[in-house]
Image: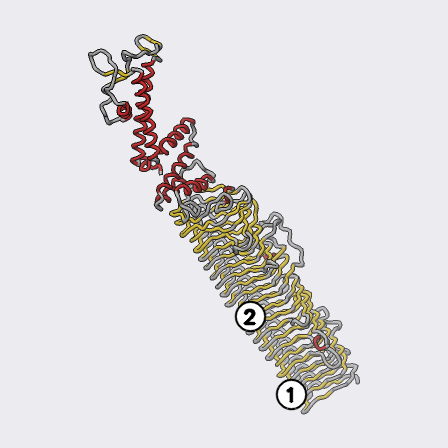
């Protein structure tokens, strides 16, 4: 048969054209068929027409069945009206020609039932050329195991398509059939699918976009991929402004795109977005989308395009093309969960996201980044943030983790996480972040720094069993931080070896915390712990601090009500002498252990606290020991306070610039305990008095003391005086005992003085002259000693500010 030409006809019953072989066309344009149209197994060709089969504007009361149809040319059914199903199962349509390649045109068609483009008994549905479903209204769309070959054009165009049931673009590999395959873009933009959309066991390939659903509305779940079969996209899944009343589940998808692999921007999804075992070679973008929750598990995103050369540009800047997983500005009333997500060649962005639940990032890695690994700048999390690995495999972040200005309703916890590398240090940044609870790092390694300047934490800041490494540079910047709970560096479990190590500088200047503490922490050589000018509301819990080399611990300007520490020569709270301490203006109100040991005797307190103070980098300053003495005195340890001050002033005296000052300070400390030892003052007074008695007795025996009787011959003093009282009378600067008036130094009648030198009437170095000189020196010494002793006993030096 050459052709069938029946345009504009009316048929009361079925029109059956089955198993018919025509060398030409079938023309049924603008016809009316009361029941069904059957074209099963027939063959048609275009001939000199533009289509092999045409039933445009035709009304069919029942099914349109074209199973196993063979058409060498396009099949056109524009604006066809079908009362039941449209079936092209097993059909083969080759619409390639001299003009545009159009295989099947059902634009503006209407079908109450299903449109089936599936594998049939004789083989799969094959279309060589574009399939058009624009503005069609159908009950259901089934494309099982079909082959759509757009021949250089989109494989399927369904713009503004309305499917009142479900849509299925899947394969039948599980049942021995073929996969679904589309060569060319499958475009369902602005379409409406009232029930489920299912895509699995499929292969999509397009020059730019492989599957496009921009502005599409779906009334139920969208299921892409399946664990038992492969679903591949060679091109972009472009679904911006998507509206889904159910869930979006992507499982086992392999996507290879150009600029973007999966684009779901500005979408609104009533259910959860779930991606399982997804692999892409280009970015995945969800920015500005709304969903009930987002969960990614087993997702691998690798950048296939070469990195941009930005030599001379800012080092840490979030360039748009550096992003591999973009969740910026998303709105989630539930959690964002990323498990076993691996990014290579780009970063993860959650900029300004609003997540009422929390962020869970576990067993993840972000590698080969431009500088930033995770960016959550300005993000809000209703509960908490958890980034975790496992004891066997840590989560690796080879770039900066940035929570700059973020707000977290719970806590931030990092467990078994490695940040940065030795070659490329990175940071955990929380500048100006507000965390309702706290921050915990446990079993983490940071090659770089923790930066939390001006952050506000309502709970604790724990660095437990973690390693901070950035030699001779900042490893923890907490300047201006406000911590409502405890700031602590510690090894988490007492039974394990020391696992908290700091190699670099910890700076917490002008910060606030309820408690500051460290326990079983190792400090590397040339490291610095600078807790300066901090305001600690409760106490400092200074546990074991192991110094691996020379370093420093600076508490200058910090104030705290209670200091709990331990001092030892081998292992203590202060590096056992290897760390130099900054204690200037370090103010503490009480000492839990005054001696830093178990005993609190004055001797123990003096011994161990003196060792503690001797480790200062500025031993010339007397402020730390004076403050220690004040604290000890306020705790009722008066003798210990006095001993501490004596040692402090002795050390201070050795720092005087002149040798005279050093000598006087040394003597004052030796004889009077720097004005703080009444016993020393008494012993010194007694020694000087005994010295005076010896001098008086010696002069008396040499007859160098004569009676002071005016107008009478010189006579020896005899028994007129008592040497003890005479010496005491000479020492006392104010009190007169009357002994000195009885006798004076002179040459008695029995004296045999050795001649000295004479200058006129003056005798020099004679025995009488020397006696008078030594006696005058004794009087000055006695007056001085008595004055200093009285000042010491009266507490004049204490009231004068020496404490």
Mark 2 → mark 1, Cα distance in angstroms: 41 Å
Q: Residue at x 54, y 72 (%)?
A: 271
Front residue of 478 and 9? 478
Q: Position of residue 527 (x, y in %)?
A: 53, 44
Label 2: few (<14), some (14–19) or many (≥20) C-alpha neighbours in 10 Å? many
Q: Position of residue 301 (x, y in %)?
A: 63, 61
Disc 2 designates what residue? 272
Disc 1 designates what residue? 61
Nearest to viewer (mark 2 / mark 1): 2
Q: Is residue 200 above or below residue 321?
A: below
Q: Residue at x 75, y 85 (%)?
A: 4
The residue lying furthest to the bottom in this view is: 12
Quarter holding residue 532 = top left
The residue lying furthest to the left in this view is: 711
| Mark drawn on residue 565 | none
Q: Position of residue 509 (x, y in %)?
A: 46, 47
- First along the sequence among labels 2 and 1: 1
Front residue of 730 and 613? 730
**Quadrant showing the N terminus:** bottom right
Q: Secondary structure at mark 2?
A: strand
Q: Is residue 520 above or below residue 392?
A: above
**Quadrant showing the C terminus:** top left
């Amino acid at each position: 048969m050459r052709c069938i030409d029946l345009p504009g006809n009316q048929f009361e019953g079925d029109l059956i054209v089955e198993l018919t072989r025509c060398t030409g066309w079938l023309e049924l344009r603008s016809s009316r068929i009361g029941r069904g149209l059957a074209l099963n197994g027939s063959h048609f060709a275009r001939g000199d027409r533009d289509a092999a089969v045409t039933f445009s504007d035709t009304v069919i009361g029942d099914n349109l069945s074209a199973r196993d149809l063979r058409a060498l040319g396009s099949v056109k059914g524009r604006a066809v009206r079908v009362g039941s199903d449209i079936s092209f199962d097993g059909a083969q349509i080759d619409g390639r020609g001299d003009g545009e390649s159009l295989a099947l045109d059902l634009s503006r068609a209407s079908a109450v039932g299903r449109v089936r483009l599936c594998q049939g008994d004789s083989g799969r549905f094959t279309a060589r050329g574009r399939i058009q479903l624009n503005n069609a209204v159908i009950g259901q769309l089934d494309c099982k195991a079909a082959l759509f070959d757009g021949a250089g054009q989109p494989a399927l165009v369904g713009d503004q398509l309305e499917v009142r049931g479900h849509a299925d673009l899947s394969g039948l590999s599980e049942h021995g059939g073929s996969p679904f395959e589309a060569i060319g873009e499958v475009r369902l933009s602005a379409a409406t699918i009232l029930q489920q959309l299912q895509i699995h066991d499929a292969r999509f390939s397009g020059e730019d976009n492989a599957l496009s659903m921009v502005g599409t509305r779906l009334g139920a779940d969208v299921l892409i991929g399946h664990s038992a079969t492969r679903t591949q996209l060679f091109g972009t899944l472009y679904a911006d402004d998507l509206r889904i009343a159910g869930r979006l589940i992507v499982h086992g998808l392999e996507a290879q795109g150009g600029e973007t692999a999966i684009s779901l921007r500005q979408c609104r999804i009533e259910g959860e977005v779930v991606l399982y075992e997804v692999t892409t070679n280009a970015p995945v973008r969800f920015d500005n989308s709304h969903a009930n929750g987002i969960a990614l598990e087993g997702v691998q995103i690798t950048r296939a395009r070469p990195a941009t050369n930005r030599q001379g540009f800012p080092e840490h800047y979030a360039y748009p093309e550096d992003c591999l997983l973009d969740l910026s500005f998303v709105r989630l009333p539930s959690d964002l969960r990323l498990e076993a997500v691996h990014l290579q060649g780009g970063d993860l962005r959650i900029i300004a996201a609003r997540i009422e639940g929390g962020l869970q990032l576990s067993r993840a890695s972000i590698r080969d980044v431009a500088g930033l690994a995770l960016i959550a700048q300005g993000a809000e999390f209703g509960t908490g943030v958890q980034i975790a690995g496992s004891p066997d495999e840590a989560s690796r972040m080879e770039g900066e983790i940035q929570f700059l200005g973020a707000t977290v309703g719970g806590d931030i916890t990092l467990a078994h996480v490695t940040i940065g590398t030795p070659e490329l240090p990175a940071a955990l940044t929380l500048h100006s972040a507000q965390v309702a609870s706290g921050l915990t790092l446990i079993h983490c390694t940071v090659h770089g720094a923790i930066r939390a300047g001006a952050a506000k934490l309502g709970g604790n800041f724990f660095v437990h069993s973690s390693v901070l490494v950035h030699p001779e540079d900042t490893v923890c910047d907490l300047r201006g931080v406000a911590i409502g709970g405890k700031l602590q560096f510690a090894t988490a479990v007492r039974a394990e070896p020391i696992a908290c190590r700091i190699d670099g500088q910890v700076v917490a200047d002008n910060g606030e915390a309820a408690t500051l503490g460290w326990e079983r922490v190792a400090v590397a050589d040339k490291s610095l712990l600078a807790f300066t000018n901090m305001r600690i509301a409760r106490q400092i819990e200074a546990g074991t601090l192991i110094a691996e080399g020379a370093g420093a611990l600076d508490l200058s300007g910090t104030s705290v009500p209670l200091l709990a520490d331990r001092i030892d020569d081998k292992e203590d709270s202060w590096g056992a002498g290897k760390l130099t301490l900054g204690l200037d203006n370090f103010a503490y109100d009480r000492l839990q252990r005054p001696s830093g040991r178990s005993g609190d005797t004055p001797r123990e307190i003096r011994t161990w606290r003196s060792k503690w103070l001797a480790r200062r980098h500025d031993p010339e300053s007397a402020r730390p020991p004076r403050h220690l003495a004040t604290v000890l005195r306020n705790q009722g340890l008066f003798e210990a306070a006095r001993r501490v001050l004596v040692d402090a002033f002795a050390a201070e005296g050795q720092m005087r610039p002149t040798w005279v000052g050093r000598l006087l300070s040394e003597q004052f400390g030796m004889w009077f305990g720097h004005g703080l030892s009444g016993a020393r003052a008494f012993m010194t007074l007694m020694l000087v008095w005994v010295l005076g008695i010896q001098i008086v007795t010696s002069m008396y025996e040499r007859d160098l003391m004569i009676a002071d009787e005016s107008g009478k011959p010189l006579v020896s003093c005899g028994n007129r005086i008592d040497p003890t009282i005479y010496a005491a009378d000479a020492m006392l600067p104010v009190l007169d005992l009357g002994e000195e008036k009885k006798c004076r130094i002179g040459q008695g009648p029995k004296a045999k003085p050795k001649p000295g030198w004479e200058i006129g009437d003056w005798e020099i170095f004679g025995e009488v002259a020397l006696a008078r000189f030594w006696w005058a020196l004794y009087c000055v010494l006695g007056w001085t000693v008595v004055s200093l002793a009285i000042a010491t006993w009266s507490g004049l030096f204490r009231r004068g500010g020496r404490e």
